[in-house]
Image (cartoon, rainbow, N blue to C red):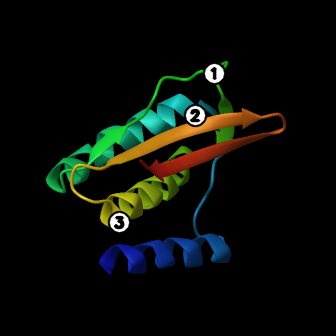
Amino acid sequence: MIRLVSDMQEVFHLDSGKVQVTKDRCPLAKICAEVTIMMQAAAKERGINLERPPEKQAPMVVETDLNFAKSIMSAFVSKAIDYSHEGGWVVIDGQNRGSEIVLFVKEK
């Protein structure tokens, strides 16, 4: 609940212009790797395997605010861990679909 309130405050600050958002070019693999490391302890605590498969395509680069991107991805991974069963897997993956990059956080 505290995290939800914190996230809401970030959104309100963004809307009011109090937060500066930067746009940097960043490899998606770097964001996925950092989120995987950050969420590993939570996954292990619940008996969940967290996986980030190697990129199958050319490296994908996104233009984003790195901190917000990691925050959003962490929220998705956290929910996937919450809803997975012990011994399950949560996979973080991305796919280049021409003019867009699709990010997947899925159970298997």
Label 3 packing within 10 angstroms: few (<14), some (14-19), many (20+): few
Mark 2 touching mark 1, by CB under 8 A?
A: yes
- The residue identified by callout 1 is 59
User: Considering only vertical position in the picture, is 28 above or below 15?
Assistant: above
Q: Which amino acid does label 3 sit on?
A: Tyr
The residue at which mark 2 appears reads as: 28
Determine if residue 1 is in view.
yes
Give, as a three-letter code, the residue at label 2: Leu
Q: Which of the marked residues, 1 or 3, is nearer the chain's N terminus?
A: 1
Q: Residue at x 48, y 51 (%)?
A: 106
Which residue is at a point 65% across and 21% down the rendered structure image? 57
Residue at image location 66% in from the left, 30% down from the top: 61
Residue on which the image places disc 3: 83
Nearest-to-viewer mark from 2 and 3: 3
What SS does tag 1 mark?
A: loop
Q: How far apart are marks 2 and 1 (CA)?
A: 8 Å
Dot 2 or dot 3, earlier in sequence:
2
Residue at 63 percent across and 21 percent down: it is 59
Q: Where is residue 2 in the image (x, y as percent from the top left)?
A: 31, 78
Question: What percent of the width, then of the height, locates residue 95?
Answer: 66, 35
The label nearer to you, 1 versus 3, is 3
Q: Reading the chain from its start, which is encountered first: label 2 or label 1?
A: 2
Which labelled disc corresponds to residue 91?
none
